[in-house]
Amino acid sequence: GEIETWAFQHCAEIKSVIIEKGITKLGYGCFEYCKNLTSVSIPDSVMFIDDNVFYYCEKLKKVTIPESVEVLGEAVFNSCRELTEVNISAKITEIYDELFYDCTKLEKVNIPDTVTEIGARAFWYCENLKDVKIPKGVKNIRHQAFIGCESLTSIIIPEGTLELGYGVFAGCTNLKYLTVPGSVIRMGSGLKDTQWYKDQPDGLIYLGKVAVAYKGEMPDNTKITIKEGTVSIASSAFY
């Protein structure tokens, strides 16, 4: 069975939900705007959690996604501003767009090794997110995935990652340590807010084999040398 689309939308009186075993799908926005919902128990029969299921459940604090869940849709926890911790099923292969958008108190999330893509704005302004481990299987991190995550201090992008979208780490003002492997062939702009960027010397800056930005003043007739082996130049690198 399933809980249908918008089944409990705007039910502000609901504070706790226990979903019975046998339910396999949570439909689109089924608990959307349940503004006083603080806890939810999801049984291991659930396989599909559709988009916006807990959208704007602003008092929801902690959720465990059972190992049965194979799809966790877009914006499931968008604007759950009391959410501090989430455990994600090891069957999940993609962190969809805006999954944790504006979860301002989120401190910890495990991204399972099965994940191959992190969607656009997935952790938008999760300003208390302190620790993120990017799994080895991740190929793409889409635009603005970690924008505004000002508590992040260190990120290691694993070997095998191919693309980092624009503004992935924009607004990550305390990001001091950033490692990007040679496998990355395309990268967007948006590093100038980071402490890592501020610590770099003037001139053309590289991450892995990508020229990501030119730092400092560029006088007339400046000669710029592109290193041998460079695979791409990031968007707005000389802006």
Image (cartoon, rainbow, N blue to C red):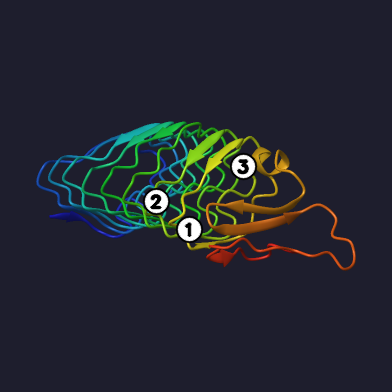
Residue at left 68%, top 44%? 197
Q: Nearer the viewer, mark 2 or mark 3?
A: 3
Label 3, residues with CA under 10 Å away: few <14, some 14-19, many ≥20: many
Q: Amino acid at mark 2?
A: Glu
Tell me residue 227's x, y (percent): 62, 60
Tell me residue 196's x, y (percent): 64, 40
Q: Nearer the viewer, residue 228 or 220?
A: 228
What quarter of the picture does the N terminus occupy? bottom left
Q: Is residue 76 above or below residue 84?
A: below
Of the image marks 2 and 3, the number of the one nearer the N terminus: 2
Q: Nearer the viewer, residue 206 or 15?
A: 206
Pick out the residue farthest to the left.
22
Label 1, residues with CA under 10 Å away: few <14, some 14-19, many ≥20: many
Q: Nearer the viewer, residue 129 or 10?
A: 129
Residue that carries the numbered disc 1 in the rendered image: 120
Tell me the CA gap for discs 1 and 2. Answer: 21 Å
Q: Is residue 2 left or right of residue 237?
A: left
Of the image marks 1 and 2, the number of the one nearer the N terminus: 2
Residue that carries the numbered disc 2 in the rendered image: 32
